[in-house]
Amino acid sequence: MRQIAIVGSGPAGYYTAEAAQKQWGDDVRVDIFDCLPVPYGLIRTGVAPDHQSIKGVSRRYEKTSLSENVRFIGNVMIGKDISVAELQDNYDAVVLATGAPNDRKLGLDGENLRNVFGSATFVGWYNGHPQFAQLDPDLSHNTAVVIGNGNVALDVARILSKTRGEFAGSDIVAHALDILATSNIERIVILGRRGPHQIAMTPKELGELADLERACPRVDADDLPDEGEDALLEPGQRKSVNHLRGFAAIPEAHRADKPVDIEFDFFASPKAILGDGKVTGIEVERTQLKDNRAVGTGETYTIDAGLVVACIGYQTSPIPGVPFEEEAGRFANDEGRIMPGLYCVGWARRGPSGTIGTNRPDGFSCVEKIAEDIGDGARKAGGEGFEALANERSIDFVEFHDWQKIDEAEQARAREDAPREKFVAVEEMIAATRKS
Ligand code: NAP
């Protein structure tokens, strides 16, 4: 019997478990660990609350969890409660599927001012991640700046601009809805350091901006390259750029009943965050493209703003004893192999890119590496070894049936039109597992 430990219960972890089941059938046992008492990682706390159809993929992971040879073990922090080396002592293979939960830094003056957030923090806040539930952002200023031209920037801009009614059917947490209801934001500037042809935004997500109740996207037609040049783009990117062209053509009359502007500011690189204690604005430098890179022109200007959210990518958290590539913000690995017996998948392996589905081939390729390394499998203690350690250290771990109780309780306390009201404190989650 092969014993595999997967650290992280997001998409990369579950696809790896699925791949192990495909590879070895009943001849494998998989324990999936998570530091929270709830599974699904990014699906629960990263995917936007108004993108419920994307979150539906968790039903597939639930099926995996309910199979005989897979076990979810939550509320255990690997690297703190139990070390990676201890897991390696007990499992034939340890797979780090820990994602990339930390914000990349801008490296600019003023980055630590109040009301300047990275997207992991801000998204974690509106998605009810226990670490960020207390954030309490101030939305009283009329302008917010969102830095970055990826899908996370779109998520943040969209969430900031929606009415309460537009959150029907979403699982946005109550504390975020309450603060959003106080918002005075009328201008959301999305800063892109390069141009429309270089955006990392996908068409469906970009298209959503055209259908918002009180907000309207704005693109300066002068920023758009000649239409003929779109032919050079790959089809998805061409569709995205088509949306930008559509936004540039929206007549002013159409904006009359849309008090919130979502303004794309291209060729605009942040230089410094301004303020004294709290952010009051951002200094920006105009750029031009040279060899597809943004190069400053020396022309600068200031945008007055009371909220800045940097959506510029994420980094994996280092774990003591595991080789780490600082620059890339991920574990040092060769196609998923950190060393025989220790592997990484998903964002922890390749950095924060790709869709949820990209993690599936990643999981399969990782299991191929494991199969090469462990052959018929060694004979380690697996879950029993973990339980012995957990008992010794009084680790209060939870399993999938405990999550099912949390899930049920969250659904039971949902407001009207919402699939659930998440618990945002670990203690509340644990308390829900104790109810009969
Ligand atoms: P991303 O797609 O990598 O975009 C990051 C953006 O930040 C890029 O436009 C990048 O510009 C910009 N940037 C990086 N460093 C910067 C700096 N110092 N100053 C100014 N701009 C900077 O990252 P993401 O938006 O965080 O998304 C992560 C992944 O999750 C992506 O694969 C994304 O597609 C996926 N995702 C998907 C969905 C969805 O499908 N609905 C939703 C959310 C996220 P350059 O290009 O110039 O480097």
Image (cartoon, grey):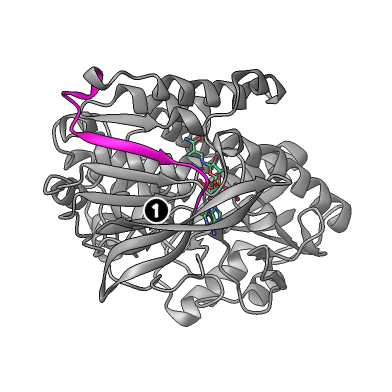
Magenta-drawn segment: 254-268
Q: Position of residue 282 (x, y in %)?
A: 36, 61
Look at 69% across and 71% down and name the residue there.
324
Image quarter of residue 296: bottom right
> Residue 164 is drawn in which quadrant?
top left
Placement of 215 over or under 282, stated as above or below: above
In the image, residue 322 sits, relative to residue 349, either above or below, namely below
**Which residue is located at x 80 percent, y 53 percent?**
335
- Whole-percent x, y for residue 66 in the image: 50, 40
> Foreground residue, 322 or 252?
252
Instruction: From the viewer's perspective, tell me whether residue 295 is left or right of residue 27.
Output: left
**Relative horizontal placement of residue 312, taking residue 111 as reference (left or right):** right
Specify the farthest residue to the bottom.
392
Q: Is residue 206 magenta?
A: no
Mark 1 beta carbon near ligand 1 (under 8 Å): no
Helix, strand or loop status at disc 1: loop
**81 on left or right of 4:** left
Q: Relative to 68, is 103 above or below?
A: below
| Residue drawn at 13 percent across, 44 percent down | 181
The residue closer to the viewer here, 391 or 119, is 119
Q: Is residue 26 visible?
A: no
Q: Which residue is mark 1?
A: 38
Which residue is more in the foreground, 132 or 360? Answer: 132
- Residue at the image point whose x is 16% and y is 51% from the top: 179
Q: Give yes or no for residue 262 being in the magenta stretch.
A: yes
Residue 318 locus on image (x, y percent) = 60, 72
Is residue 134 placed above or below 288 in the rendered structure? below
